[in-house]
Amino acid sequence: DRTQSTAFKKKDDDQGKKARTGKTTAVNMAAANPLYYTDRPDPRLETLSAHSAIPVHVNRVMEIDEGFLACLGAERYPGYLGTDFGLFGRPALLYRGQTQRLVEQLATNAEAAPQRATVLDGKGGTGKSAELLKLASVAASLGHIVVYAPSTVRWVNSSRPYAPEAGDSGLFVQLELALEQLRTMNGMCRDALAKVPLGRSAAVGKRRLAAESTLADLIDIGLQTPALSHDVLDLLLDVASTQTAVPVLVAVDEVNALWSDSMYRDQGDVVLPARRLRLIRALLPFFEGERSLARGWVLGAISRVDVRFMPKDLKLRLDPPPAVPLANPDLAKDPSIVRQPTDLPFDTIGVERLSAAEAWALMRFYHETSIIASPVTEALVAKKWVVASGNPRELFASVTSFA
Amino acid sequence: MLLLLGVNLPDQKVVSVALTYFYGIGPLTARKVCSRLSIHRECKLSELTEGQLNQLSSVLSEMTIENDLKRQVSANVLHLREIGTYVGKRHAMGMPVHGQRTRNNSKTAKKLNGQWLRKYSTPARPLLSSPPPPSSSAFGIFQAPLSGRQQW
């Protein structure tokens, strides 16, 4: 039996680590110091929805709709937001001025869709994933069809099953992930899907759908028959992108993974590029300008967290080098420097750093949720804001660190 | 624990790691086996279906691993000894084979080399007990005659 190590012998421990340490605190709350062990504060927050996404609520912390988040599941919160929500005790995000502009753009594009996709770009921690999450929740409450992928890296990091597609297509299917995506869409925008008829009779596997069948009926087939989930998703995107009854929001986080090499390998042990995955292939044409929506918006967000899934050529096109080579690397990072022109298949929107008012609102919220014990003063906010250079992630880190 | 081809594999390990528990399979071969069967990187043995396990068994059966490989290695070393090569002699003496120093160190070689020969009796060709045949006198009495393939 080679599973037993011969190098050392573990202590005999009948209880095990979990039984020893326990998941719950061992503190007797009845005898605990009331100054130290206080109840978690519960500030009243308005839920972000179509009605509350208005200019008056700019610079206020609002709660994301729980029903929307339930469709995602706690494991699928984008980026570090899951940890943040756990710390706050509720899924709360700041409604920024930029968020309001994006919501207005969403309303504009709901009537006349732009030809090119839009991608949110910016330094790590500026709030790209948070903006996408807010927009997706507003779009869902507005009754749009929402195709929201909170983490595309999970599709390419070889963490989920895959299999070669039948036939000679050379593509690989990920039925579990496709099914997960269908479930998310079904939970978020079932009513909107029920309003859109297929417009033509369609065959999915052995099932035949009439032209009057709706996208909700189509999704039901996919949920009942996981083997058809890819076909259902492809047909759903096809119909949703060409119809004009209901606006569509295609929101993809970590969109750079669509162009990267995946961690999957084919049968010959050759690395698979992401475009050979059928799930990626369903969304990639929207960002490459090969497909567009008749009504709605295609929005993505770049992620700079996992560098393995940031292709070099995309990185060069997003951050082109200066037009004139500069020896000083700090000077080369200056955004005002003229850079070499690049062609991207999508438009980019830079996510801005926090303004002073936004930093103030955020820190007040941190104080209300007991993340900051000391009262929030102008001097404290100014100090933290300068130290963090207006970056929300760095602001949170500086507030929660012991330095 | 999963018993596969006579080896007890830990269920909770990732497949590409569990396969290295076979003699003759390292990380690269394990990765190739997983790629061939389209098993993703984070898949654990307990998550494999019966069909996948059967496929895995059939792929592993095609490979030379475990006792087949040990037999092959042992036969190779024995052949080297039988034909009287330098490498064979070093295996027999339990000394380093690849020209390492023996003045000091060479502990590993003394421990491991020759293990393939210890199970077998003395080689078939006589060495010192009888005088060498006249045709091989050019190579000295301590060396067995060259095999027919190498003679020139």
Image (tube, coloured by chain):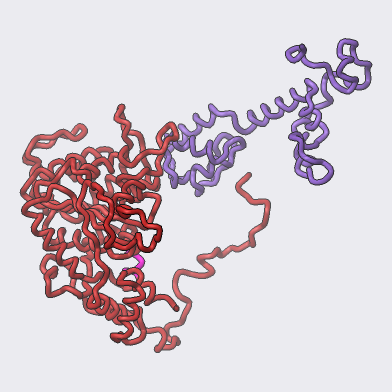
Instruction: Locate residue A213, reporting x and y percent.
Output: 9, 41
Q: The purple chain is which one?
A: B
Q: Judge by depth and name the residue closer to the eye, A98 or A143.
A: A98
Q: What residue is drawn where x is 37% and y is 43%? A: A261
Tell me the quarter of the picture where residue A56 sits. Answer: bottom left
- Compared across the picture, whether B17 is left or right of A320 comes to right
Can you tell which chain is drawn red?
A
Q: Quick one: A322 or A283, which is closer to the camera?
A: A322
Q: What stretch is highlighted in magenta?
A: A81-86
A49 lies above or below A282 = below
Pinpoint residue A211: horizontal percent, then vertical percent: 7, 38
At 37% from the left edge and 49% from the top edge, which residue is drawn? A309
Residue A39 part of the magenta-drawn span? no
Does residue A334 sit above or below A228 in this rendering? below
Residue A31 position in % (x across, y down)? 45, 87
Determine if residue A220 is in view.
no
Residue A335 in the image: above or below residue B56: below
Whole-percent x, y for residue A178 in the image: 27, 45
Instruction: From the viewer's perspective, tell me whether residue B20 is left or right of residue A111.
Output: right
**Total numbered circles:** 0
User: Is residue A245 visible in the rendered structure shown here?
Assistant: yes
Residue A170 placement, left or right of A31? left
Which is more toward the observer, B101 or A138?
B101
Helix, strand or loop for the magenta stretch, by majority: helix
Q: Residue at x 34, y 45 (%)?
A: A260
| On-image quarter of the N terminus of chain B | top right
Q: In this view, does A178 lie above or below A210?
A: below
Q: Please identify the quadrant where the C terminus of chain B is shown.
A: top right
